[in-house]
Image (cartoon, coloured by chain):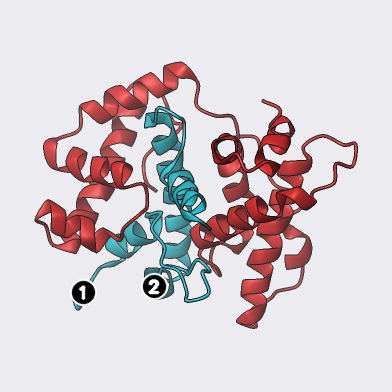
Chain colours: A cyan, B red
Amino acid sequence: MTEKRDDEALVEEVVSAYRERSVFGEIRPSPAFYDLDDDGRLRAFEEANRARAMESALDPQGLSTTAHALLARIKAGR
Amino acid sequence: MDLDALLPAIVAGDADAFGRFIAGIELDLRRSLRPFATRVDIEAVVQEALLRVWQSAARIVPDGRPDVLVRFSMRVARNLAISEIRKKKELLPGDDEVADAYDDSEGAPPDPMLRRLIHDCFEKLPPQPKMVLGMRLENRGAEPDLKLAEEAGMKLNTFLQNVTRARKLLGDCLEHRGVSFIGRAP
């Protein structure tokens, strides 16, 4: 994946609830987080808060994508 | 909602009860980690911390004070953030105490009227932003945006721009209706 991304795209990647896992099963930080400066990281933090609030409002069970991702992992065995 | 009431079910392995607990705590938990937001990826910390809470719930001993499960989760998340920062040798004076006093003034879950407004505004989004935001919602954090972009037939940048646009338009729509709950991106 060599496509160059601007700050807005990097922020949006960090906002996503998808996170890779290490070989030991630990949840890994988004690589895009390390490409952002402090302002970008704070923006990603605030946008993620907004996104999760919106997601849980749109979800029939009141769950955000973070909650769904976690529950899927729990139900899958970890 | 008394989240401590969910503890016995969580200890018994009821993942749906844990889901209700997450729904009740997630936004407060995130906000409590704001002091660390420039140094660690808060999404990763929140997910890892909640997994650890799930795994160690059986060891929680009620201390007679309310919100034992919430306090335990906050502590796990804060310690995890500090541990990540320590690994990178970026710990600052005061980090050990900073997340103890979190601001929960905005912690109330959305009320039914607000849910309906958000849903209405979502339905009114233009086709592409609505599609990509819907894909993210339906995917539930299971796959990377690159995969979703491919499924949408878009370049990753285009996909991400559409997600950003969708959320901004949603914020505009809510603002137009007098709601600043989600608001406009700064």
Labels 2 and 1 in the same subunit = yes
Where is residue B47? Give x, y as percent.
53, 56
Mark 2 vs mark 1, foreground winner is: 2
> Measuring 68% from the left and 76% from the top, which residue is drawn there?
B91
Q: Which numbered disc covers residue A4?
A: 1
Q: Which numbered disc covers residue B145?
A: none
Is A15 above or below relative to A1? above
**Which residue ends up furthest to the top in the rendered image?**
B113
> Measuring 26% from the left and 43% from the top, which residue is drawn there?
B133
Is B134 above or below relative to B33? above
Determine whether the residue tagged by mark 1 lies in a helix, strand or loop: loop
In the drawing, does residue B136 fall left or right of residue B100? left
C-alpha distance separating marks 2 and 1:
13 Å
Where is residue A7? Give x, y as percent.
31, 66
Q: State the residue in front, A19 or A37.
A: A19
Amino acid found under the numbered disc labelled 1: Lys
Where is residue A28? Give x, y as percent.
48, 69
Q: Residues within 10 Å of mark 2 (few under 14, many from 20)?
A: some
> Measuring 64% from the left and 50% from the top, which residue is drawn there?
B54
Q: Is residue B69 visible?
A: yes
Q: Which numbered disc covers residue A31?
A: 2
Name the image quarter holding the N terminus of chain A: bottom left
Q: Chain of mark 1?
A: A
> Measuring 13% from the left and 52% from the top, which residue is drawn there?
B152
Q: Residues within 10 Å of mark 1 (few under 14, many from 20)?
A: few
